[in-house]
Image (cartoon, helix red, strand yellow):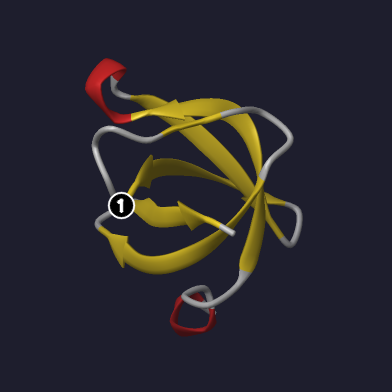
Amino acid sequence: NIETVPGKIALVTEQIENLAGKGAVEIAGIVWTARAEDDDDIIAVGEKVVVLRIEGVKVIVKKI
């Protein structure tokens, strides 16, 4: 259920780097394309993030 995704904790599975257009997280066993809330943030694999919102098919996240 997509409405329950915002607020969830996710694990970064591919480094999130907005300017390079890459990043992915796993939420409850499902991999999502992810972008950081702040374009300057680079979030490493293995870090935990919180999902702020969904934009299209991407989740927007920030570091915990």
Could you say which quadrant of the image residue 15 lies in?
Answer: top right
Question: What amino acid does circle 1 point to?
Answer: Glu
Q: Going by the image, does 52 lie left or right of 19?
A: right
Q: Quadrant of the N terminus?
A: bottom right
Q: Position of residue 37 (x, y in %)?
A: 30, 52
Under tag 1, what secondary structure? loop
Q: Nearer the viewer, residue 3 or 13?
A: 13
Q: Is residue 35 above or below residue 56?
A: above
The residue at the point 52 percent across, 73 percent down is: 5
Q: Nearer the viewer, residue 9 or 38?
A: 38
The residue at the point 27 percent across, 46 percent down is: 38
Q: Position of residue 3 (x, y in %)?
A: 44, 83
Identity of the residue furthest to the top in this view: 20
**Residue that carries the numbered disc 1 in the rendered image:** 37
The residue at the point 74 percent across, 62 percent down is: 28
Q: Is residue 27 above or below residue 35?
A: below
